[in-house]
Amino acid sequence: MPRRSLEELSSDECFALLGQETVGRLVYVDDLGPAAVPVNYALAGQGIVFRSEEGSKISALREHDVAFEVDRIDEASHSGWSVLVRGTSEEVEFEHLHELLSRVTGYVPLPWKKGIHRIWVVITAKTVTGRRLADFADEDFF
Amino acid sequence: MPRRSLEELSSDECFALLGQETVGRLVYVDDLGPAAVPVNYALAGQGIVFRSEEGSKISALREHDVAFEVDRIDEASHSGWSVLVRGTSEEVEFEHLHELLSRVTGYVPLPWKKGIHRIWVVITAKTVTGRRLADFADEDFF
């Protein structure tokens, strides 16, 4: 299997990829350190929107910075990309929900899990970075 | 699409799932807050082993607790599972590498990316948790 070169993605490419996917990983810090859990989301403008229920994850988001990671990896070909949004999260007040959702193109994140998910959260990016493990023509092993 | 119930996985189930996969997300904290990046890994006993090169990620691992997240999500059926290992990381000294790798069953993590990856890291779990979004017979919407 050839090893591949790592290509940095532009911010525009990162947001285009975020807009194509529907599942990412909420990355947060709580008393035990860093953690990540998959959530389904929508991209609204440049905000990552998801729904949750009250709990330790939401408490942790209120106190710390947060990140959101999305990737698509092809294990067979050892290729793929990943995007990391780093920023802050805030809970969306009901009166702002309509405006926020009007910016969502397509998919709106209905929770997959049973239960009550009253809290809408939006993550606003401070930085967005992405990488692609791409094919390269001249194989150049180390 | 029916919404699904969330089932907690046992530690044994979590490690069995970790042993089936080859790509997960290293979850760490640096000066900008939490972050996550995909890496290919192997399970050696109950340790998560991966290779890296010197850089900000490795520096961050030296100073903080760490996590490792693996999931498999089927977006079409809204089902899947995720496992989160939370613990500490250490760099493996050369003289311990053989012993560590002797515990790897099958796949050994050769980096997919070109370049020199001299540093072997093992994550030792303090906690392992996992969840599965499973089918349920009696649909019970909220």
Image: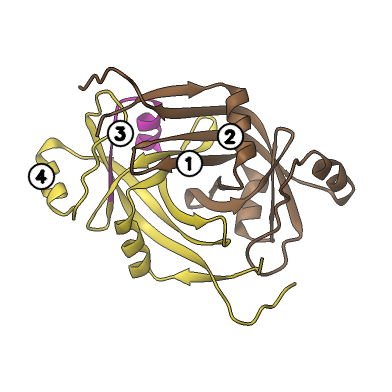
Chain colours: A brown, B yellow
Q: Residues within 10 Å of mark 2 (few under 14, many from 20)?
A: some
Q: Which stretch did the figure color magenta?
A: B48-64
Q: Which residue is mark 2?
A: A17
Kindly identify the amino acid type of the residue bearing the numbered disc 3. Answer: Trp
- Can residue B65 be seen in this snapshot? no
Say if labels 1 and 4 share a chain.
no
**Amino acid under label 1?**
Arg
Q: Residue at x 79, y 47 (%)?
A: A92
Q: Secondary structure at mark 4?
A: helix
Disc 2 residue type?
A: Leu
Which quarter of the picture shows residue A47? top right
Split into 4 quadrants, where in the image is the N terminus of chain A? top left
State whether discs 2 and 1 lie on one chain. Answer: yes
Does mark 4 fall on the same chain as mark 3? Answer: yes
Chain bearing tag 1 is: A
What residue is shown with label 4? Answer: B98
Mark 4, Cα crowd under 10 Å, few <14 / some 14-19 / many 20+, is few
Q: Chain of mark 2?
A: A
Q: CA distance from mark 1 to mark 4?
A: 32 Å
Residue A53 point in image, percent of width and height = 69, 61
Amino acid, disc 4: His
Tell me the crowding category of disc 1: few under 14, some 14 to 19, or many 20 or more residues within 10 angstroms, Cα based.
Answer: some
Q: Quadrant of residue A42?
A: top right
Q: Which residue is mark 1?
A: A72
Q: Quadrant of the C terminus of chain A?
A: top left
Task: Return the residue at label 3.
Answer: B112
Quadrant of the rendered image containing residue A54? bottom right
